[in-house]
């Protein structure tokens, strides 16, 4: 047997074992659909249904296969599949989970048939001084770090203010927080300046969760019996704890300091952690985690700086699976498609947690032919290697779902005299 054939078979089996855990409570057509979508997107590096069908190698006409996939997507995200997915993910997470919540956008500037299409800020074109707005959707994502320090999604919702039952983006964010609290009991939520809102602090206190949130320059804090701007505290202090930190792919020598304050929302004691030497203005991080030593201060700073992985997660979804290039029009179908992309990203996380000596993982990385031997974020090379191995496949996964029929039995007539 050729090595490529052996690797293809092994990888197919790995994908099907993974999807069977997600779809174990679904009907057989839905199980096959889950396997088709996951396998097709991993093989084609695309979320376009026509590209997925090309990799399934089905005997039926292409238009009929696309219509079949579309009908399943229009049903929305299967609740049982989502529940099974979260159960699988829960086993990958360390004892002290870190959840990153962030917003992104899906831009469809030329779209006019998409349901509830709204106006969003185009993050790829906007700058610090100028915002560019296009037609599109908002995406709220909550990612948790696995034992291999790679992100997997526990909440991903595409939404628009043009929806009939839409209330606010805050309600979507609160749903993400509630799911994280329900899954892990207690976790550390890490968020950027866009979430410096009293409602966020109150919600996290209500759920009894830890947090590390970067503050804006507008924030006021209660210190020594009076309310003062956080920037004033920042300017009055200097970093005394030196530690190396990685920011935007570069290593920096950062200087940290901390002070006990109270936040406007709850008047509870929290800590303001100041990070000097990274950006033009020192970063201000608010946390309710207990700080007793300089190691605790460094841990809080490193927890926040690990949030770059959710940004890479967004970028990988858009680049590897052409997330913004979908053509399904109903919002339920768009969210369902997003769920199956999430399954593909989770499969990459599943492969990343295998030992470096694992034969399948070695074959995938060899097929990707990476320039660097080691990287901090390996989803790109894994996705490239998987699609490269599956390019040898002459059949999709339909033969793994053949219907078992009873053997043909010829009718016998017995003459009775």
Image (cartoon, rainbow, N blue to C red):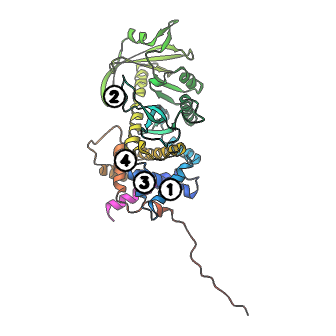
Number of callouts in the render?
A: 4
Q: Is residue 149 visible?
A: no
Residue at figure coordinates x 26%, y 43% from the top left: 371
N-terminal of the two: label 3 or label 1?
A: 3
**Quadrant location of residue 165?**
top right
SS class, disc 3 = helix
**Quadrant location of residue 52?**
bottom left
SS class, disc 2 = strand
Residue at figure coordinates x 52%, y 31% from the top left: 187
Query: Which residue is label 4 attached to?
Result: 383
N-terminal of the two: label 4 or label 1?
A: 1
| 112 over 242 or under it: above or below | below
| 118 over 254 or under it: above or below | below
Query: Which residue is label 2 attached to?
Result: 246
Real-space CA distance between mark 4 and mark 2, rounded to the nearest whole angstrom: 25 Å
Real-space CA distance between mark 3 and mark 4, rounded to the nearest whole angstrom: 19 Å
């Amino acid at each position: 047997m050729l090595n490529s054939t052996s690797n293809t078979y092994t990888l197919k089996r790995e994908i099907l074992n993974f999807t069977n855990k997600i779809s174990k409570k679904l009907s057989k057509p839905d199980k096959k659909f889950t396997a088709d979508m996951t396998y097709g997107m991993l093989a084609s590096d695309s979320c376009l249904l026509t590209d997925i069908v090309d990799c399934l190698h089905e005997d039926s006409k292409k238009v009929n296969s696309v219509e079949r996939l579309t009908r399943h997507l229009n049903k929305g995200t299967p609740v049982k599949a989502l529940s099974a997915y979260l159960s699988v993910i829960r086993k990958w997470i360390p004892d002290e989970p870190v959840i990153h919540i962030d917003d992104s956008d899906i831009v469809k500037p030329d779209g006019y048939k998409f349901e509830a299409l709204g106006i969003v800020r185009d993050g790829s074109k906007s700058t610090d001084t100028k915002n560019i707005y296009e037609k599109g959707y908002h995406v709220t994502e909550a990612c948790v770090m696995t034992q291999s320090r790679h992100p997997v999604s526990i909440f991903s919702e595409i939404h628009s203010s043009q929806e009939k039952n839409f209330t606010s983006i805050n309600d979507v964010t609160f749903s993400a927080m509630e799911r994280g609290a329900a899954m892990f009991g207690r976790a550390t939520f890490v968020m950027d300046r866009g979430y410096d809102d009293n409602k966020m602090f109150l919600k996290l206190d209500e759920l009894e969760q830890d947090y590390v949130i970067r503050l804006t320059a507008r924030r006021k804090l209660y210190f020594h019996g009076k309310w003062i701007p956080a920037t004033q505290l920042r300017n009055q202090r200097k970093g005394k704890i030196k530690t190396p930190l990685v920011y935007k792919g570069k290593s920096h020598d950062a200087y940290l300091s901390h002070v006990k304050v109270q936040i406007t929302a709850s008047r509870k004691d929290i800590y303001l952690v100041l990070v000097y030497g990274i950006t033009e203005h020192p970063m201000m991080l608010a946390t309710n985690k207990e700080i007793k030593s300089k190691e605790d201060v460094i841990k809080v700073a490193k927890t926040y700086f690990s949030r770059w992985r959710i940004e890479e997660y967004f970028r990988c979804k858009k680049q590897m699976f052409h997330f913004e290039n979908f053509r399904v029009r109903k919002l339920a179908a768009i969210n369902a498609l997003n769920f199956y992309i999430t399954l593909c990203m989770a499969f990459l996380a599943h492969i990343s947690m295998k030992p470096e000596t694992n034969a399948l993982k070695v074959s995938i990385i060899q097929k990707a032919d990476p320039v660097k031997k080691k990287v901090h974020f390996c989803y790109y090379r894994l996705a490239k290697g998987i699609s490269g191995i599956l390019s040898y496949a002459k059949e999709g996964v339909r033969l793994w779902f053949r219907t078992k029929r009873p053997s043909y039995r010829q009718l016998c007539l017995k003459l009775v005299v």
